Structures are given as C-alpha cells and as structure tokens.
Image (cartoon, grey):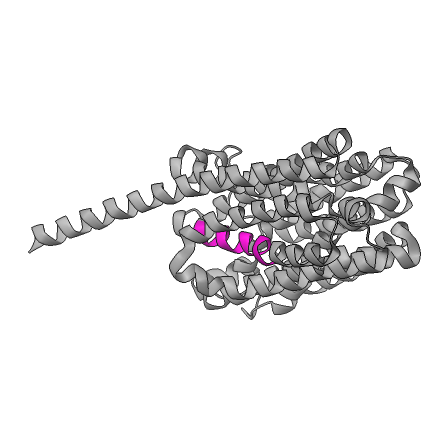
C-alpha cells in the first residue's frame, strides 16, 4: 500500500494519518472485550437474580459467540458498498444498546437478546479492524496501529473479570454492566469525530473465507485453534463458581485471583514475542499442554487457595500468549491471504468460545466442576495433538521448499 492508496482509502484530503480514529477504535475494542467477558466473574449473582443455574447463565456468553461467528463471516458481504465508517459506527451503536439491555434485563430472554446484539457488534467490528487500520495510517505505520488496537484488547481482557467481580460486589452485576455504557458512548462519539470516509473497495464473495480451509495446513491449524479456545473457555467461563464452591473464596479474594490471571497474562503477552522468533511451532504445542496440566491440577488441588493462585498465574501466563502465537502462525502460513485468514480465525475463536461455554455449562450442571475441568483438560490435550501434526506439516513444507530452492540454485550454477 503506497502513500497514494493510503490517501485514497482513508478519504482524507490531506493524507495525514488518522491516529485519533485508531485510538477511538482501540477504546471501542476494549469496551467490546470487557462486555464480552465480564459475565465470567458475575455468573453467580446473575444466576441468583434471574433464577437460573450457573450453566444457564453461562449461555449469555455462548449466544454472543454464536452471533459473533455469523457476523464475522458475513459482515463484508452484507455491508456491500456501504461506507465502512458507517458500518463501524453502527457496530458501536449496537454495543450501547446491548449494554443497556443487559443491565436492565428483567428476565432471561431479554438478557440473551442483549448479549446477541453484543455478538453482532463484536463480530462486525473485529472483522473490519485490521483492514480499517491499513486505510487509516500509511504502510510503515500499520504495525503500530494494529498494536494499539490489540492493546485495547489486552487491557480489557486483563481487567474485565476482576473489575466485574469488584464492581459486582459494590453495586451489583447490573450496575457493573451499566457502567460500561458511558464508555461505549464515548467510543462512539470519538469515532464520529475522527473516522474519515472509508468507501468500500470491492465486493467480497460469501464463500471466499471458508475456501481457505481447503489448504490442509490451514485446516489443521484452525482445528487446533478451535480446540484450544474451546478447552480454555470450558474452564474459564465457570471459574468463579469453581472458586466459590471448591476453593471457598470470598468476593475480595476472588477479585485478587482473577487479577493474578490478568497480570500474568500481560507478562505472557509481553515476553512471548521473543520466544516466537525462533520457537513458534514448539510454542504452539507447549501452550495447550501446560493449560491441560493446570486444568487437571485445579481439579485435584483446587481446595487450596495458595496452590490455586499459583496455578491460575501459570494459566494466565500461557493462555493470553496463545492468540499472539497463533496470529504469528497465520502471518507465516498465509502471508498473501492474512486478511481473509484473520476473518476466519475470528469466526473460529468465537465459535470455540461458544462451544466451550455451552458444553462446559451442560457438564458443570450434570457432573460438577471437577469433572468439567477434567473435560477441559482433555480438549486442550487434543488441541496439542493437532498443533503437533500441524507443526510437522509446516516443517515438511519448509523442507520441500528448501530442497527446491537448493536444486534450482545448483541447476542455475
């Protein structure tokens, strides 16, 4: 993307980078992610207030994932020739409506409708984020722009669960969700003021993203991604009920344990980049293995607060590094189709979160938290197996490429 295309794509008369718009999008992403995962730490009071089981309350996370999957795979086609500025602003408006509906929901039905609207906002906004950043800043600044967007994601993922638990203890779960709405309004206004016109460039075919799965290496990798996030959220969604019923912690201690996960996650995200430079394939295998071991250890030693805190620190360290590792894999596996591959990965991750929360809730209600955590460990183990097979396939392709390059060099000599 040269300077001329940047100026044309952004619709700016001056061709200046729209950093204000990038930061506005980062705020919106942070609010989206915080809204998505805040129920993790509020399942118990939500269930108690609405007369639900913890498993039923967990479906509020599931339904947002379902609609995020549908939207991420279809938003580019449905938006058609619409100016992407209005598409992003529309997704932000849905976030505000969703937050208000969830906070004021008098029953399970309206809670689920509000969470479904959140899923639409998440799927639509996330799917367009990377492509939008590429049009807001010049080519040499795209990595910085993307880092700002993902920074909003990392911060929200770190603070949403402990903050939700803390606020829920002070002002109730409805008050915690209601406080998100002003932030969403601020993100909407900021985007209205800073986003330039972003005319649609070309029409996207409905099946073009899914066609990437015809590549065996891509299919194996995406399968590993799905199992990884499914196993992760089969455990993480029901962490609060586990900590309250098995570990026996109070609300303040619960907030501390969730904060431990968040702080460890920030550390993991910070250090994994250096590791991935030389050990990408092995890291993709090690991450689900470590998470599976932690899941089993929690099931066995979960009645000890000290041991549980240490295990959750390990969980946070490796689980938040997983998206960074698999995103790096994506750029190396599909360097020419990274945008389409990114949309596919967003859909698969959301589908995995949905499946993990749904199946996890059914198992939790039927067999209890210890068996449910064991199931999570089994799924994570399968993710490690697929990641290993994918890494072997990648190694074979590199070996073939190196052999062909050497043969061509000898022939030319």
Considering depth in this image, is 53 or 137 the residue closer to the camera? 53
**Seen in the image, is 146 located left or right of residue 389?**
right
The quadrant in which residue 129 appears is bottom right
Task: Tell me where the magenta segment starts and ends, as one range.
Answer: 317-329
Question: What's the magenta bit mostly, secondary-structure-wise?
Answer: helix
Can residue 3 be seen in the rendering of this structure? yes
Q: Residue furthest top?
A: 366
Give x and y (percent) for residue 189.
76, 61
Q: Is residue 179 above or below residue 62?
A: below
* Residue 331 at least partly seen: no
Q: Quadrant of the N terminus?
A: bottom left
Residue at x 22%, y 50% (from the top left corner): 402
Image coords of residue 387 (percent x, y): 45, 43
Would residue 43 appear left or right of 231 to someone viewing this image? Answer: right
Name the residue at 6% across, 56% down: 413
Nearest the camera: 183 or 79? 183
7 vs 263, left or right, is left
Q: Decide which of 356, 411 is in the foreground and name it.
A: 356
Q: Determine whether 112 is above or below 335 in the image.
A: above
322 part of magenta stretch:
yes
Residue 376 on image: x %, y %? 62, 39
x, y percent for residue 241: 79, 44
């Amino acid at each position: 993307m040269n300077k001329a295309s940047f100026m044309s794509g952004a619709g700016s008369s001056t061709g200046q980078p729209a950093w204000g718009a990038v930061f506005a999008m980062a705020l919106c992403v942070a609010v989206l992610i915080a809204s998505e995962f805040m129920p993790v730490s509020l399942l118990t009071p939500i269930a108690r207030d609405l007369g639900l089981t913890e498993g039923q309350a967990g479906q509020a996370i599931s339904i947002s994932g379902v609609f995020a999957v549908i939207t991420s795979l279809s938003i580019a086609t449905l938006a058609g020739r619409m100016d992407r500025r209005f598409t992003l602003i529309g997704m932000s408006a849905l976030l505000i409506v969703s937050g208000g509906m969830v906070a004021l929901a008098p029953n399970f039905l309206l809670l689920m409708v509000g969470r479904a609207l959140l899923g639409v906002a998440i799927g639509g906004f996330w799917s367009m984020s990377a492509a939008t950043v590429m049009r807001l800043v010049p080519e040499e600044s795209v990595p910085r722009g993307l880092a700002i967007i993902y920074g909003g994601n990392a911060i929200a993922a770190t603070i949403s669960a402990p903050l939700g638990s803390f606020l829920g203890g002070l002002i109730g779960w409805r008050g915690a969700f209601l406080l998100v709405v002003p932030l969403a309004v601020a993100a909407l206004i900021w985007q209205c003021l800073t986003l330039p016109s972003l005319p649609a460039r070309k029409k996207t075919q409905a099946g073009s993203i899914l066609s990437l799965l015809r590549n065996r290496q891509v299919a194996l990798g995406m399968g590993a991604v799905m199992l990884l996030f499914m196993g992760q959220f089969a455990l993480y969604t029901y962490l609060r009920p586990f900590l309250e019923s098995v570990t026996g912690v109070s609300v303040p201690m619960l907030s501390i344990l969730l904060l431990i996960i968040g702080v460890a996650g920030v550390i993991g995200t910070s250090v994994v980049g250096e590791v991935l430079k030389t050990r990408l394939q092995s890291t993709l295998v090690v991450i689900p293995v470590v998470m599976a071991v932690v899941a089993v250890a929690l099931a066995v030693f979960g009645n000890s607060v000290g041991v549980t805190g240490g295990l959750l620190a390990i969980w946070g360290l490796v689980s938040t590094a997983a998206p960074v590792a698999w995103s790096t894999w994506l750029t190396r596996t599909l360097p020419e189709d990274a945008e389409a591959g990114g949309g596919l990965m967003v859909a698969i991750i959301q589908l995995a979160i949905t499946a993990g929360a749904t199946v996890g809730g059914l198992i939790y209600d039927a067999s209890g938290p210890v068996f449910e955590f064991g199931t999570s460990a089994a799924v994570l183990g399968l993710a490690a197996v697929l990641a290993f097979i994918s890494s072997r396939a990648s190694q074979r392709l590199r070996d073939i490429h190196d052999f062909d390059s050497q043969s061509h060099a000898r022939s030319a000599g």
